[in-house]
Amino acid sequence: MPIYDYFCCKLNAMRIAFVGYEIQQKHVVDTQEDEDSLLFALLSQKGLDIHRVIWDDPKVRWEDFGLVLIKSPWDYHEKIQSFMQWLDSIAAKGIPLLNPYSIIKWNSDKHYLLEMIAAGFDVIPSAIIESGASSGLAPFFSKFNAQQLIVKPCISAGARNTFTVTPNNLPELQAKIDALVQEEAYLVQPFIKEIETAGEWSFIFFNGAFSHCVVKRPRSGDFRVQLTHGGSVHIATPQPHHVRSATAFAERFAKGCLYARVDAVIIDDVLTLMELELIEPYLFLGTVPGGYENYYTALVDRIRQEQDTLSRPSSLNIQ
C-alpha cells in the first residue's frame, strides 16, 4: 500500500471542511477548469472525511471539524469584516486552519507589500493612500518616474475597482478615486509594461516546495491577466534563478503554509513580486501532470503534523 494512501486511511477520522463561497460561478469563466470540484473529488476518493462548505454559511457547525482547509472563499474581500470575524471564530474554537490564521489575516491587506520592500525583497514599487486621506495622485508620477499608474484597493481581488491612471485621464478619474479612498485604503504602483509584453508569472508551492509555474497574459489592449477579463494561461518552465527568487518569498513570508502562489513579473531578468497569494489562489493544478496529486500529498503531510499522536506501525509493509 502506498504510504500516503495508508496514512489517509488512518486519517479519515479527521473531519475536514473544504471551504469555498456561495456563488460558485461569480469569479470564474466557462473556460476555467473547475479546480475545486476536481480536487474535492480526488481528496474524497483518497479516503479523507472531507466536506464542501461555505465560509459564511450560518448553518455550518464548525466545531464538528478537526481541520479547516481554505480553498476558494473568493468573495472574502467583499465581506471583509465578516471574513475576519469568521477567522477569529475558527481560531477561538482551536480548529487548525490551512493556511494558518495569522498569515491569512496578514495577507488579506496589501500593506504587506511595504513590509517586503522594507525587508529588501524585489517588489513592484508601492505606496499606500490610507482610508480618508487625500488621494492626490499627481505626485506619484514623479515618485515612480512613470507616465502610468495602477491604483487599486488594498483589500481586493479580481481587479475590483482597479484603475490605470495617466496625466491625461487623471482629471476625470480623480474625483471617483477621491470618493473611493474615503471608504478604504488604496495601493498605488507604476504600471509595469512587462505584464503586457511578457505576462505575469505564477509560481505554485506546496509546503514550501516548488511545484509548477504558469504565465498569465492579458488579452490585446488590456492589462488584466485574469481569465474573467479575457486573459489566458500558459504552461511555463521558469529559469532556475527565478525559481530560487520565488522560493525566497515563500520561505520568508509563507512559513507553515500548505499552499502559496507567488505572482511576479520579470524585469531585466529580475523576478519582481506583484502579489503573494496565500488565501484563495487558483492553483492551476490541471496544467501539469500530477498537480492534483501534489496537493493531496502535501495535505496528507500536514494532516500528519496535526495528528502528532499517530505512529507508523512497524508490522506493516508500507512502500
Image: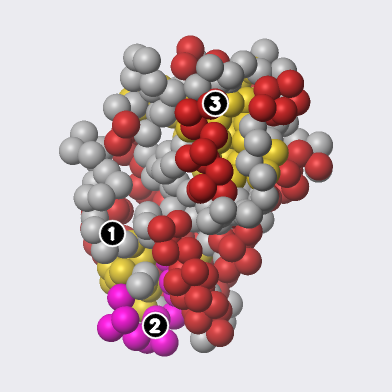
17 versus 120 height, above or below: below
Magenta extent: 57-69
Horizontal side of 119 relative to 317 (left or right) equals: right
On residue 203, the disc is none
219 to 87, vertically: above or below:
above
Numbered circle sitting on residue 170: 3
- Circle 1 residue: 40
**What is the image's colouring?**
secondary structure
* Residue topped by disc 2: 62
| Residue 259 seen from this side | no
The location of residue 84, given as percent across then percent down, is 52, 70
- Left or right relative to 140: residue 38: left
SS at badge 1: helix
**Mark 2 or mark 3, which has the lower sequence index?**
2
**Can residue 170 be seen by looking at this rendering?**
yes
- Eye-nearest disc, 3 or 1: 3
Tag 2 and tag 3, C-beta contact below 8 Å: no
Q: Report helix, strand or loop for mark 2.
A: helix
Disc 1 versus disc 2: nearer the observer: 2
Q: Quadrant of residue 30?
A: top left
Q: Amino acid at mark 3?
A: Leu
